[in-house]
Amino acid sequence: MSGWTDALGVIEKLAPTIATCVGGPLAGGAISALEGVLGLTPQPSSSTDDRQNAIAAALSGATPEQLMAMKKADQDYALGLAQAGFKDTETLASLKVQDTVSARDMQTANKSHVPAALTFLITVGFFALLIGLFCAPVPEASKALIYSATGTLGTVWLVVVHFWFGSTSDTGQVNTLLANSTQTPPAK
């Protein structure tokens, strides 16, 4: 397995409810559920990316028992969410869409220049750091810090792009929901 994207494909097949939550506001609980099944204990300072990478690595060597436990964890997780008021995966997927829509609505109502300025600063900073990494040698003592900062800034840049343009995962979810929906006959 080459990374989180491949791992997420496996998670979507074995634990669809958890996979739905991973990309939204309930991501922390979903990632914790996966860590519990795979026997992972994250460090308090671990970022979400670090935790996802650890899950991907653990999934690549998962035993059949762990994969079955993941299915069971998904059922338990879905039951817990249902008790908390989340009826189905469509409701969970809509949380992520609502989060993005409310941020965009805020921007439309306030017409603030701050999001655009932050977008500009993050974009310039990210690509300047990348160019710097290609042009200058990285001191051995600070490699871990610089590479970690680059990964974090890359993730933040993706969030910024998602804010302005949406994401392909949202499009994929919409396509899946449309494909699974039933067409109602037009009213006469």
Image (cartoon, rainbow, N blue to C red):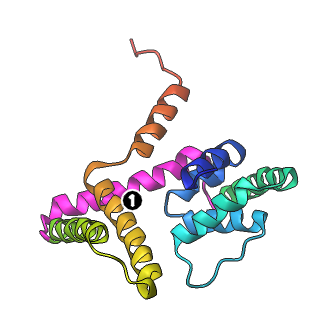
Tell me the SS state at disc 1. helix
Q: Is 150 placed left or right of 11 in the picture?
A: left
**Residue at 76% over, 56% down:** 61
Across and down, in percent, residue 184 comes to 48, 20
Query: Residue placed at 56% from the left, 55% from the top?
Result: 4
| Residue drawn at 70 percent across, 65 percent down | 33
Instruction: Give the answer, above or below, for where 155 lies relative to 164.
Output: below
- Report if residue 97 lies within the magenta region: yes
**Which portion, as a residue range, is magenta?**
84-113
Q: Nearer the viewer, residue 34 or 91?
A: 34
Image: 62 above or below 43 = above
Report the amino acid beneath label 1. Asp
Which is the main secondary structure of the residues drawn in magenta?
helix
Q: What crowding class fits label 1: few (fewer than 14 Cα within 10 Å), some (14-19), or many (20 or more)?
A: few
Residue 56, quarter of the rendered image: bottom right
Q: If the image is split into quadrants, where does the C terminus sit?
A: top left
Instruction: Say which residue appears at 47% left-offset and 49% top-offset.
Output: 94
Q: Examine the structure image and report whether residue 153 is included in the region drawn in magenta.
A: no
**Left or right of residue 94, residue 15 in this image:** right
Residue highlighted by disc 1: 99
Which residue is most to the front? Answer: 137
The residue nearer to you, when weighing 65 against 60, is: 60
Q: Residue furthest right?
A: 65
Residue closest to the far top: 188
- Give coordinates of residue 24: x percent, y percent: 49, 59
The residue closer to the viewer here, 182 or 132, is 132
Residue 11 picture location, percent across and down: 66, 49
Q: Position of residue 101 (x, y in %)?
A: 32, 54
In the figure, is residue 11 to the left or right of 118?
right
* Total numbered circles: 1
